[in-house]
Image (tube, rainbow, N blue to C red):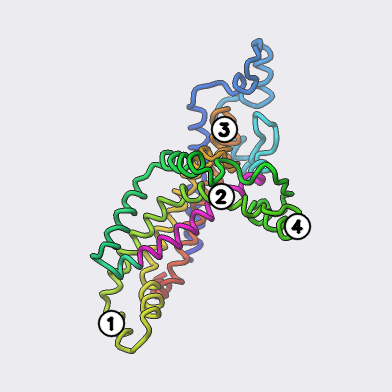
């Protein structure tokens, strides 16, 4: 029953997203036909013919109805610029964004949880104060500024880490899964491209760190707060009195019960990761859907922008649905209330 209610709520939400995406991109000044042809001069007849060919001469309600009808048939449309199917372009670029966002989220989880638990256990110490100070700075850090600072230091100054792309230009990796870390590892293990996996890791390091900084800081602060609440509970004192090891008391009894608010924050961070990916991919020339969307907005490529916003919203809604389901796994008492 709970899942059915959530799924039913998806319909008006996604309908609103399609309407917003359709309307907002058309509010941006600029003629997509003029941008598409570049510096060439088009006479009015040729311009009108292209408008008719692309269906842009129809009234906006008719264009929106055609857009929704295509969506109901699983068609995201064709790019106005490349004339390729938007779904095909999305399928090529989406693994790069998933790889970046997944690595950033994993980094944020591991570091954020570790620092948050350690800060709670050492409450009031210099370590606790340092972690909270770093978390505050990390949460307030603008993505574009942080990315440029890391590029200037690690790439330009020290020349340790590459600036852009997913792998060095000296490697020719055949796409198998679309995930460069996996594909480069497979090529490395086969002896086809020695050192490819290391190159892919180095190219991923800075973008993942930049994208994961804000969620890392948020998770660290929330973990510390939740753990401080849990450490004062009676069942924690009971667990210690039973002679359980400190690690078991903290991880099994403490962290497990502290995960409920952390899971909530984690679900909300997905939206931040998708939004941050747009800037991060642009800064590091990462060939994912974020940079794809920015380029599409600049070119007034309506179908690409509409599809990108819709799929991003669908991912965000789906993740939050999974988070709601995880509540019952983390806290069995909540299952009985549904």
Q: Residue at x 45, y 57 (%)?
A: 108
Residue beneath disc 4: 191
Q: CA distance from mark 4 to mark 1?
A: 55 Å
| Residue at the extreme top of the image, as rendered | 43
Residue beneath disc 2: 204
Q: Which label's residue is closer to the chain start, 3 or 2?
A: 2
| Residue at the extreme bottom of the image, as rendered | 242
Image location of residue 297, percent across then percent down: 54, 31
Q: CA distance from mark 1 to mark 2?
A: 43 Å
Residue beneath disc 1: 237
Q: Which label's residue is closer to the chain start, 4 or 2?
A: 4
Q: Residue at x 33, y 49 (%)?
A: 137
Image location of residue 276, percent across then percent down: 46, 44
Q: What segment is highlighted magenta in the picture?
A: 91-117
Q: Nearer the viewer, mark 4 or mark 2?
A: 4
Label 3 SS: helix
Of residues 51 and 264, which is closer to you in this image?
Answer: 264
Q: Which label's residue is closer to the chain start, 3 or 1?
A: 1
Q: Is residue 305 left or right of residue 45?
A: left
């Amino acid at each position: 029953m709970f899942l059915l209610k959530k799924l039913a709520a998806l319909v008006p939400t996604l309908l609103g997203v399609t309407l917003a995406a359709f309307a907002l991109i058309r509010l941006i000044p600029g003629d997509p036909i003029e941008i598409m042809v570049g510096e060439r001069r088009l006479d009015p007849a040729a311009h009108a013919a292209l408008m008719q060919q692309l269906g842009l001469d129809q009234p906006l309600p008719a264009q929106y109805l055609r857009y929704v009808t295509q969506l109901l048939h699983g068609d995201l449309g064709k790019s106005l610029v490349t004339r390729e199917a938007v779904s095909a372009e999305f399928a090529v670029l989406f693994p790069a964004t998933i790889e970046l966002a997944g690595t950033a989220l994993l980094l944020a989880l591991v570091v954020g949880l570790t620092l948050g638990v350690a800060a709670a256990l050492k409450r009031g110490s210099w370590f606790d104060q340092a972690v909270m100070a770093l978390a505050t700075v990390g949460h307030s850090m603008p993505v574009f500024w942080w990315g440029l600072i890391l590029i200037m230091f690690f790439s330009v100054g020290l020349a340790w880490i590459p600036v852009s792309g997913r792998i060095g230009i000296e490697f020719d990796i055949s796409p198998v899964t679309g995930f460069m870390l996996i594909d480069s590892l497979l090529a490395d293990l086969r002896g086809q491209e020695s050192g490819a996996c290391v190159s892919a890791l180095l190219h991923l390091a800075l973008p993942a760190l930049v994208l994961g900084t804000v969620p890392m800081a948020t998770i660290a602060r929330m973990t510390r707060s939740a753990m401080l609440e849990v450490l004062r509970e009676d069942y924690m004192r009971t667990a210690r009195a039973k002679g359980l090891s400190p690690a078991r008391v903290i991880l099994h009894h403490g962290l497990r019960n502290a995960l409920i608010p952390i899971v909530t924050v984690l679900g909300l961070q997905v939206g931040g990761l998708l939004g941050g990916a747009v800037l991060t991919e642009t800064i590091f020339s990462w060939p994912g859907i974020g940079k794809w969307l920015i380029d599409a907005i600049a070119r007034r490529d309506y179908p690409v922008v509409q599809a990108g916003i819709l799929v991003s919203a669908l991912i965000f809604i789906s993740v939050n649905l999974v988070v709601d389901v995880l509540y019952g796994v983390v806290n069995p008492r909540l299952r009985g209330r549904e």
